[in-house]
Amino acid sequence: MKTTVTMSQKFKQFIVILLPILVTQIALSAITFFDTNMSGHAGSTDLAGVAIGSSLWVPLQTGLSGILMGMTPIVSHLIGGGQAKKVSYHVMQGLWLAILLAVAVLAVGSMLLPVILDGMNLENEVRSVAFRFLSFLSIGIIPMFGYTVLRSFIDALGQTRISMTITLISLPINIFLNYLLIFGNWGFPRLGGAGAGIASAITYWCVFAVAVLFVIRLKPFVSYGMFRQFHGVSFRVWKELLKIGVPIGFSIFFETAVFAAVTLLMSRFNTITIAAHQAAMNFATTLYMIPLSISMALTILVGFEKGAGRLKDARQYSILGIGSAVALSLVTAVVLLVAGQYVAGLYSEESKVIALTQHFLIYAIFFQISDAIATPVQGALRGYKDVNPAFIITFVSYWVIGLPVGYLLASFTSLGAFGFWIGLITGLAVGATLLLWRLVKVQRATRKSAAIAA
């Protein structure tokens, strides 16, 4: 990471940090994309089953991963503050916490999953696909969380190209395994959507193994001495990580869970509606990788500048990141307007599914605009280590406003399933407004405190 002075230098460093993160996030989301896409070509039942399974798993996975992502601002502040010797110890504590979280998920999930699926109004075949998909996927939970910690360490050093390389290595593995296990090619059993769960689990083990190898062998990571010394659990460091990570995790959980809740509430509609909704939501999630990547870049850059006491530079990076996200959201909106039918055709060959998916994608345009503001703002706030208010804002916007509005519109108007999407758009817009207000307030308070201290 380099100290910058001019806006052109900042833009260059922002791009250097951002582009590998963006490629990495797109590649990671592509794992879910290909799981959904390839399952859809196996049949609408497989697509619906994977949709239900993903809706149960993704909020939990992203929420708990969000807790571990608290490692990024911690490492950024340590490096910015000249305390690099403490990095290895903190990362090892993150790995211990990752193992604990994974074991807890496996234990609780084994007891609750059958109960949850039985309580939903699902067709028997859809329920079977969802159960087997999640059961197979659980094999990869431990390495998935472990990689989140190692990636946070790698990215905090500004080495986002390494994360990109690791993920790009894993993507062909996932696609190839899907090809074998979903469709039963080359003598493998035809597992349909459930095969995507096995493919993803194996992929996560590969990702983690490659990350460990890179951290041990490559510069500049080797200078931090990762895994050279055994460190037992430190509850003091866990407390520090959880203090930052838990609000981040809950913020991400509340955001992703509300989308999952909508998908689960869609179970009262027919299989074609569930499949079309999931296809449109999956593509919207793929586009979401743009503001999410900008958010992660801002956490690194703002955290680095804040740790070094360069508040003006931290603010400039925030403006640069949010402005870029808004501009790119307008581009994605045009893509959805012009090529909506072609996008829908990627997910299914059934004409009814394609037509309904295209309709859902129109609503996704409004997602992009709100996400372009809210998500980068959250990244900047994490760089300032201001995480609790964002958690509250996210909860209120999505769960107190967005979901209830969507439920009312879907249940008591002629909008039907589209009512849920309008509710989500409402919640996202409120959240974006409140988060932007919070960032301005934090930056003013930080400048005031620095002026008093001086």
Image (cartoon, rainbow, N blue to C red):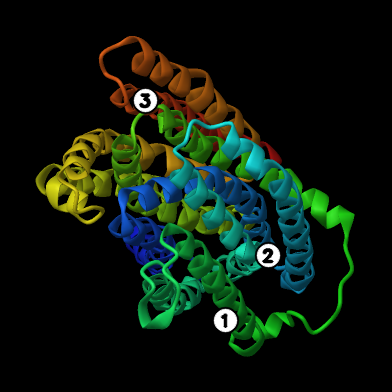
Q: Say if 103 sits above or below 125 in the image.
A: below
Quarter of the picture containing the C terminus is top right
Question: At label 2, which amino acid type do we have?
Answer: Ile
Q: Residues within 10 Å of mark 1 (few under 14, many from 20)?
A: some
Q: Identify the residue at horizontal 62%, vertical 39% (top origin).
A: 250
Q: Residues within 10 Å of mark 2 (few under 14, many from 20)?
A: many
Q: Identify the residue at horizontal 65%, vertical 34% (top origin).
A: 388
Question: At label 3, which amino acid type do we have?
Answer: Phe
Residue 142 marker: 2
Q: Identify the residue at horizontal 45%, vertical 32% (top origin).
A: 436
Can residue 450 be seen from the camera position used here?
Answer: no
Label 1 belongs to which residue?
Answer: 210
Question: At label 1, which amino acid type do we have?
Answer: Val
Question: In this orientation, which residue lies closer to the viewer: 116 or 61?
Answer: 116
Query: Residue placed farthest to the front in the image?
Result: 124
- Examine the image and state in which quarter residue 6 appears: bottom left
Label 3 belongs to which residue?
Answer: 420
